[in-house]
Image (spheres, rainbow, N blue to C red):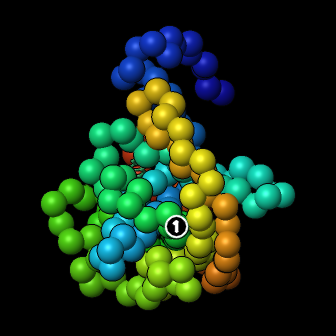
Amino acid sequence: MTTPTTHSPYDATQFRHVLGHIPTSVAIVTAMPHGRPVGVTVGSFSSVSLDPPLVNFFIDRSSRTWPRLNESSTFAVNVLGADHAELCRAFSRRGADRFEGVAWKPSDAGNPVLEDATVTLDCSHYKIDTLGDHIQVVGRVDSMRLRTGELPLVFYRGGFVDFGAA
Ligand SMILES: Cc1cc2nc3c(=O)[nH]c(=O)nc-3n(C[C@H](O)[C@H](O)[C@H](O)COP(=O)(O)O)c2cc1C
């Protein structure tokens, strides 16, 4: 039996702590502005609409990757499987070549498709909005790629869910 506690969302530390108890998928958003691959890890990816086919993610306004991603009018969302926590870490590290040693190839639209992703969605910018300290990026899905048979990578309470221990 667990005892619920009530916190105020105006306490940023508590807000972050409480939100950390909500599991998220892990995706690498990629693009190829001016022929150079860029990518960043996001836990904020979700589907938005079936008709038209829309998805979205949220990027911090202080992100250094976002201005470069935004130089392209298309992007790819590469959703990771349980065995690819290292890709998650690599694409959230600053000051490193995030693509070093990563297997990828360009999609038809030119966006980096990570070989190890379970789902890749090639998208065109549909709507970009600033909401609080984040930017909401809505994309229209142009094509999809699916690799079945792998459990998802799930981020929860600052770490990854270990399905083996379940
Ligand atoms: C599991 C996980 C989920 C993340 N989700 C987001 C996210 O949804 N939005 C975001 O802006 N940054 C997110 N980050 C942080 C970014 O990956 C990155 O570290 C940060 O944006 C700094 O790099 P940048 O300046 O290149 O953007 C996440 C990091 C991790 C490890």
The residue positioned 83% from the left and 58% from the top of the image is 51
Q: Position of residue 100 (x, y in %)?
A: 24, 80
- Classify 4 as above or below 77: above
- Classify 78 as above or below 107: above
Of residue 118 and residue 94, the one placed in the foreground of this image is 94
Residue 6 occupies quadrant? top right
Of residue 143 and residue 116, the one placed in the foreground of this image is 143
Density class for disc 1 (Cα within 10 Å; few <14, some 14-19, many ≥20) is many
- Badge 1 amino acid: Thr
- Classify 16 as above or below 139: above
- Classify 8 as above or below 123: above
**Res 70 visible:** yes
Q: Position of residue 74 (x, y in %)?
A: 52, 67
Q: Position of residue 129 (x, y in %)?
A: 53, 38
* Screen quadrant of the C terminus: bottom right
Q: Is residue 153 left or right of residue 55?
A: left
The residue positioned 41% from the left and 56% from the top of the image is 70
Secondary element under disc 1, as helix, strand or loop, is: strand
Q: Position of residue 34 (x, y in %)?
A: 32, 74
Residue with the mark numbered 1: 74
Q: Is residue 1 left or right of residue 87?
A: right
* Screen quadrant of the N terminus: top right
Of residue 91 and residue 2, the one placed in the foreground of this image is 91
